[in-house]
Amino acid sequence: MKQYICFQVGEAHYALPLGPIAQVLRFENVTPVPMAPPFVEGVLNLGGEVVPVINLRSRFGLERGAPNRRSRVLVVDRGGAKHGLLVDGVKEILELEDSSILNGGTPLQGLKAELVDGIAKVREHLVIILDGSRLLAAESLGRQSPGPGRDESEAEEVEEVEEVEEAGAGRP
Amino acid sequence: MSEIEEHRLLRAFLEETEELLEKLNHCLLELEKDNANLELVHEIFRLTHSLKSESALIGFANLSELAHRLEDVFERLRSGALLLGREPLDLILGASDLIQEMVARIARGEGDAGVEIHTLVAELTRLTGIPGGKAAPPARREPGAAADGSQLSSAQILRAREALERGEQLYSLRFRTVGEPLMRFPRAYMVFSNLEKVANVLKATPELSTPPPEEGAEGFAEVSILFSSELSEAQLEKAFRIEDIAEGELARLGPEYLARGAAAGEAGRAEASEAPAAEGETAAAAGPAAPRGAYERTSVRVDTTKLDDLWQLVGELVTCKARFGKLTGSLSSGSPAAELRQDVEKITDSLERVTGQMQQAVMETRMVPIAVLFNKFPRLVRDLSRKLGKEVELELAGGETEIDRSLVEALSDPLTHLIRNSLDHGIETVEERISRGKPATGRVSISAQQRGGKIVIEVADDGRGLDLDKIRRVAQAAPETTDAELINFIFQPGFSTRESVTELSGRGVGMDVVATRIKENLRGEVLVSSLPGRGLTITILLPLTLTILHSLLVASGGQYYAIPIRDIDETVHVEPTALRPTRAGEQLALGAEEIPVIHLALLLAAAPVTAAAGYLQGVVTRRKGQRYCLLVDELVEELDLVIKPLVEMLNRSRLFSGVSVLGDGRIVFILDMARIVELPE
């Protein structure tokens, strides 16, 4: 029996293991980052730590949409570097048996298969279980610095996913 | 085993080991100079011995093996059975290099397995004549014996060591349960839970904390438990429900039990992780050698007087708080406004002083002596001069100068490069030196000192100095080019006067990289002074700390940004009428001068330009001799910012040199002015 936090992005329901989720916050005080890739919603000050907030709608290839009062930021802490995930609302905490999770296949367009850990059926819904580390490792994709210029944000759609962990305390 | 404990154990190990290696290196270098020094041999023997035991304890077999071989060598040296000549010394240094590499790998989370040690181990073994490829092969435990140290995971070892440090004793208890098979687990569990009240159970075989599947009770006929307790044996006997136990056997274990267990190494470890199902989940974690992310050294040694100072400042801060509390009281009691204001001012003054001093004190805890960096240079100079066939003496001075720890790593490459240059290009061969009437042995000196608000590092040699004529030729400089300008050519990318590329230098990369790193990454300066035929001195000036930056806060498009004060020439009011569009972009007339204009808001695509006040503010900056004016909405204030690095994801445009959090929680990005003025081009 493992616990998951279940949330909504667009119409679909997703879940992440509850373990690394440090906090769930309302969407407030997010400072936009000029010239950042589109999936970066902004940064958040969490007790002096500057935490990037990733918009899961853009991450999943959906239209961005303005955050509303149901929007939440899930703060994921995987030892060191924290990340915020902007979602369209938190549903519930699920307890799922490993055996009730079906592996393989991505059910939705725009969602890359490697981000999906499996699918579970909870009551009448399908819940897509995400692979948290891949989801965030993917944030470091396109690490190679493309040439200077304003079109850099377009380089974001680089396909390969580098398993390089973003060292939160990288040197200046 | 929890990952946190695993981390803690490794961190502690790395910290100890790094200190040990530092000492080892130092001693080895001393030994090279003074190979008859028996005291050093003793010291190194002790160091290799601790390295061997420490690494064996945590399960790094390769590291431990090599340290063991090295220990043997010093054992031989100590007893006089071996003499320290050229060959042993080279082998010893080779082994020390390999050990460094393994530790570096372990620190990166890669374990020590990837390093080939066999050749060196064989050679060291040949040297000592002490046989045995493996460090004392572990005694296999006899079947049915109590769980011994070899079956302990590293977290269990850690807990056992901590218990010993608390002054507790280690015990092992073995017993058989009486009665019918079905009652075995409950009986064993009774003993176990009674024991838990007076002791810390480290390990129970079989696992007793969770009930077994029903048919599994068979396995509880014989149980062994390893635990620590502050009680004596006699007191412990009372804690057991004797009627439930048959053939109980309690034994006290000495601390050597742990070392013995760890020496059993991989074999025992693998066994342990295969054992009970409860450990299945952590099987991967059982071998600390498995890659699990990097274990960066995160703790610091701080002089206790610095901590005392900090503590005192905290005291003053608390006083300030109390005074504010009192002030709040007098506010509600309706004291006269003038009096209140005076009080507020007084308290604010002391608050300012205290926080300023605190900032300084905390900064100082980040400082380390530059010797940690210097210590690796004797070895470098030794190896290089042998390779080049030159005689070079290295002088180090000012190793006690304290620098910010972030500088240590950042300076390592540039300084290494400068030393290589000195040895390769600067210092002449022995024959050449003699023919020029110089001492046969060349001299390279590295010194550090704090002068004013800066750290001054000098790398000087008494070699041939810069050949300005050659630079003039290679650079095809105009005849009127001054010597000072010629010297600057060595900082040009790709510039080299070397005809042949050597392994060491002369590839045309180097000085430009040194200069760029120091100027841009470290916000420092590089000065060159050359005396043709007599030597070259390179001086590096660095700010005391990198993490606090005096900045100007500006507003643009509704957001705040910070500009480092050192990048600012002046600030100006800009009337829209003073802006002139030209073919090369907008220009600002500033007195007689016309300079290019950059709209920050447009550049950051944040918002359209707002000139609400009818005018804008301009921040004038200089880059490569050219002045630029950066237009912003508002100049907010000047302040000291604590800079944090920005993750790459947030800084694809590389427009920012960092990020900072203001007192009110607001996040500001620090503009990298060099990049900002380059962008529009």
Image (cartoon, rainbow, N blue to C red):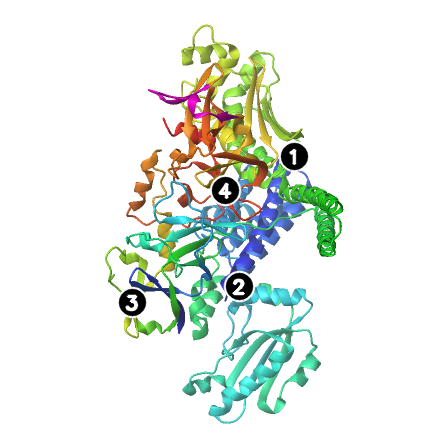
Q: Is B526 in the magenta?
A: no
Residue B633 appears in the figure: yes
Report helix, strand or loop for mark 3: strand
Which of discs 4 and 2 lies nearer the camera? The answer is 4
Dot 4 crowding, Cα within 10 Å, few <14, some 14–19, many 20+:
many
Is the same chain shared between marks 4 and 3?
A: no
Query: Which region of the structure is painted magenta?
Result: B572-589
Q: Chain of mark 1?
A: B
Spatial CA span between label 1 and label 2: 38 Å
Is the same chain shared between marks 3 and 1?
A: no
Judge whether A139 appears above or below B164 on screen.
Answer: above
What number is the disc on residue B399? 1
Spatial CA span between label 4 and label 3: 41 Å
Dot 3 crowding, Cα within 10 Å, few <14, some 14–19, many 20+:
many
Q: Chain of mark 2?
A: B
What number is the disc on residue A119? 3
Q: Is residue A13 left or right of residue A93?
A: left
Residue A172 appears in the figure: no
Q: Is B578 in the magenta?
A: yes
Which of discs 4 and 1 lies nearer the camera? The answer is 4
Is the same chain shared between marks 4 and 1?
A: yes
What number is the disc on residue B269? none
What number is the disc on residue B154? 2
Q: Earlier in the sequence, mark 4 or mark 1?
A: 1
Q: Are marks 4 and 3 in contact (CB under 8 Å)?
A: no
Report helix, strand or loop for mark 2: helix
User: Can you say which quadrant of the picture contains the C terminus of chain B?
Assistant: top left
Q: Could you tell me which residue is drawn at 35 percent across and 40 percent down?
A: A144
Q: Could you tell me which residue is drawn at 59 percent across and 32 percent down?
A: B543
Which of discs 3 and 1 lies nearer the camera? The answer is 3
Residue that label 4 marks: B668
Tell me the quarter of the picture where residue B241 sits: bottom right
